[in-house]
Image (cartoon, rainbow, N blue to C red):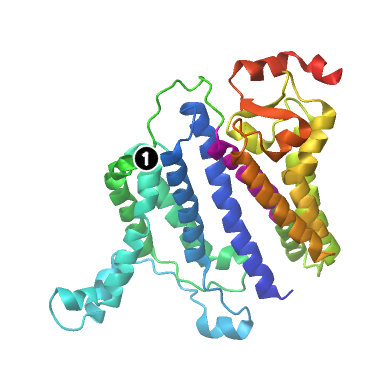
Amino acid sequence: MTSITTNALIALLTGFAVAWLLVIPYLVWTYRRRGELGLGHAFLTLMFLIYLMALWAFTLLPLPEESAAWCAVHATATPQLNPLQFLTDIAHEQRGAGLASLAHNPAVQQVVLNVVFFVPLGMFCRHLLRLRPLAAIGVGFGVSLLIEFTQLTGIWFLFQCPYRLFDVDDLIANTLGAAIGVLLAPLLRVVPGQRVTRGAEEPRPVGGWRRLLGIILDLGLTALLGAVILVGIRVAARLLHADVELPDVVAGPVLSDWVPAVVVLLMPALAGSGATPGQAIVRLRPVRATGGAPPQWARWVRFAVGSGGYFVLTGLGHFDGGFTLVASLLAIVSLVMVWVPRDHRGLTGAAARIRVVDARSEAAREGVTRPEAARSS
């Protein structure tokens, strides 16, 4: 793998990781504060995740050619530290008079883009995160500053030279955009499905969308851990100036699929209530059909025919493409089975003879107070 490909992989996976690490705590906080997510909040949360990933990609792309010759010609090493320099740039680029000419001025377009791109951040911080106006604007400033330093350092020294300009005017425009977003945040209230009619600790029915969100979180966390492991190894090798090329059999099935699946999915499933991280986030808990915590055999079965089995098969797909097809079929069947049974127990519940209940329900509390029943099964 070439140096630029490695750096691109590190940068993009880092953006993916940052986005997930910001959204997952928000989901935990939402379920503790509201007691539920709701379709409206689910839609806005998805939009927030997409926005964060777009923001990171906008910061990184297009990636440059990494070479001393390229840096000598294209590197933007001198920061622009003169506030309101954009006014001079606008005057310099202006051709003709009138609003039409002003709208076609590239310097004006650049400023407007920098303002508009941070408007959603102010809206999300104010509406979803419930931050006070000054705090939401401060987040906009902080994110913009992080982006500017990322550009100044060549993505924190992953590249030999900075390939985008550190511009204090971008910092001003981005912060202004976040402030405008704070003012426009009430517009997000019109999205339906956000009202809460029950107390945060009142149990809710277990629906298909909630089960699906738990599964998506489990898949995302497992994939994220695999990416973190691979990126961590490559970053460490780069810092140590070591030429490390992992064999495909190690980088693929072992580090990307199997190790993360064991850590994220199997270990939590075998301990305590048996809830996976995704289930715990959306306040779900597996119980036996007759009550009590699932026995150990059921936990292994649930791992094998659920998300754990998917990652096992995906890892085997590195050796034989037929396993990838089986993994895809397993994913499709699992998705259908989340919706088909009325109790939304899914394929894992049918195979392991368990059901999934709200973690605040009487059935869930019974599962915690009767672990001896599960062990005696």
Q: Which quarter of the rendering shows the C terminus?
A: top right
In the foreground, 36 or 186? 36
Q: Is residue 135 left or right of residue 216?
A: left
At 44% from the left and 45% from the top, the residue drawn is: 43
Q: Is residue 226 magenta?
A: yes
At 47% from the left and 27% from the top, the residue drawn is: 33
Secondary structure found at label 1: helix
In the foreground, 65 or 246? 246
Residue 339: image x %, image y %?
59, 40
> Label 1 belongs to which residue?
127
At 50% from the left and 19% from the top, the residue drawn is: 202
| The quadrant where residue 349 appears | top right
Residue 104: image x %, image y %?
24, 77
Residue 280: image x %, image y %?
63, 32
Q: Main secondary structure of the magenta part?
A: helix
Residue at the limit of the structure toward the left, as seen here: 98
Q: Is residue 267 left or right of residue 144?
A: right
Q: Is residue 222 visible?
A: yes
At 66% from the left and 33% from the top, the residue drawn is: 345
Against 220, residue 201 (above or below) is above
Against 79, residue 254 (above or below) is above
Q: Which residues are magenta?
A: 207-227
Residue 169: image x %, image y %?
34, 64
Q: Is residue 135 visible?
A: no
Against 283, residue 167 (above or below) is below
| The quadrant where residue 40 appears | top left
Q: Amino acid at mark 1?
A: His
In the foreground, 134 or 105? 105
Q: Is residue 360 left or right of residue 93?
A: right
Q: Is residue 151 magenta?
A: no
